[in-house]
Amino acid sequence: MEARPMRIAVASGKGGTGKTTVAANLFYVLNRMKQPVQLLDCDVEAPNASIFIRGKEVAQEKAGIKIPFIDKNICTYCGTCASVCNYNALVFVKQIPELLLMEDLCHGCGACSVFCPAHAITERKKTTGYVTRFQVSPHAELVEGRLSIGEAMPTPVIRAVKKSSSMRHTLIYDAPPGTSCSMVESVEEADYVVLVSEPTPFGVHDARLAYAAIRAIGKEAGLVINRAGLGDQEIYAFAREEMIPVLLEIPFDERIAAAYARGELLCQALPEYEASFQELYSKIVQQIQRLQVVS
Ligand code: SF4
Ligand code: SF4
């Protein structure tokens, strides 16, 4: 198959469904096929792709936002900055007067400094996480975003991970689970989304929500059913109802769970799965090509 850069996001309705397993094994087979590939671990609150994909750390950069610094010698205590802040990150107490910045609420939007009539606000960079690049092979790289402990906003770190991507590579985004804005941030540039679910009532419930969020931003998705054989048939009914192609079923197998617990890649522990992930990749390529034809 001809190598062609494309962007594949791997998402899930909830944590623990096997999303990283799918993303990491897809990366593994592309690397084995000698295709230029980058795995972008956007699950910055709990990045764990590096447990399964080992590479040499080649670079690390800080990620963060610009927060306001208020020069109290210039500030006239007019309160404009607090009134334009959509995130309630600035508290203006007129009676004292005093101006307080709640750093954890600040989104670094810059509105306060733009609207300050006294030009009392400058911006300073606040580090909220790190982006680390691991060279796995001459043509394969893992880029990991990691939110610092105690920080509340994952999206600036996810943006920094995405900035590290190279369009000479096929990109695999390991998105955060759920339907949060960080999931949307991770999948919004994807050509196609692989939604990983398990056939349990909770799994199907959360997959429905995630699928609705994916469709709301205009993306198409295919389904990977992990631990197939466990639970009931509702996941198949959901796929039929929404006309979502089932791209791969990974059976419920204790050997897979044991490999996962040892931090081993499924395709390395059980090489018979390599063909399954190659087939998954082919199906994703077909879906992307179909979308390109209809658009
Ligand atoms: S940068 Fe934006 S979010 Fe932060 S305090 Fe200023 S207006 Fe509020
Ligand atoms: S807008 Fe400027 S001058 Fe007015 S309170 Fe805020 S920092 Fe002070």
Image: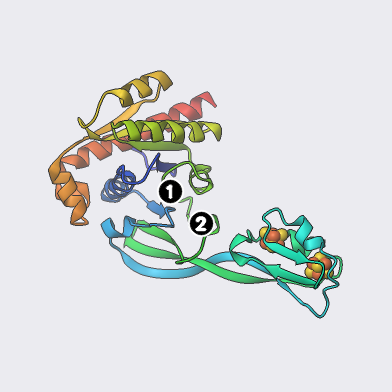
Give the class, few, some or many, for how many residues have Cα within 10 Å of label 2's Cα (few <14, many ≥20): many
Q: Camera-side residue: 83 or 57?
A: 83
At label 1, which amino acid type do we have?
Pro
The quarter of the rendered structure image containing the N terminus is: top left
**Which type of secondary structure does the marked residue at label 1 adopt?**
loop
Q: In this view, does 178 lie above or below 211?
A: below
> Picture coordinates of residue 226 (x, y %)?
27, 37
Left or right: 37, with 276 as reference point? right
Q: Camera-side residue: 92 or 202?
A: 92
Looking at the image, which residue is at 38% across and 30% down?
286
The residue that label 1 is drawn on is 176
Looking at the image, which residue is at 48% across and 57% down?
161
Residues at marks 1 and 2, CA–CA distance in whole angstroms = 10 Å
Left or right: 2, with 210 as reference point? left
> Picture coordinates of residue 271 (x, y %)?
15, 45
> Picture coordinates of residue 289 (x, y %)?
44, 30
Q: Is residue 125 above or below residue 194?
A: below
The quarter of the rendered structure image containing the C terminus is: top right
The residue that label 2 is drawn on is 154
Q: Camera-side residue: 185 or 25?
A: 185
Looking at the image, which residue is at 47% across and 31% down?
220
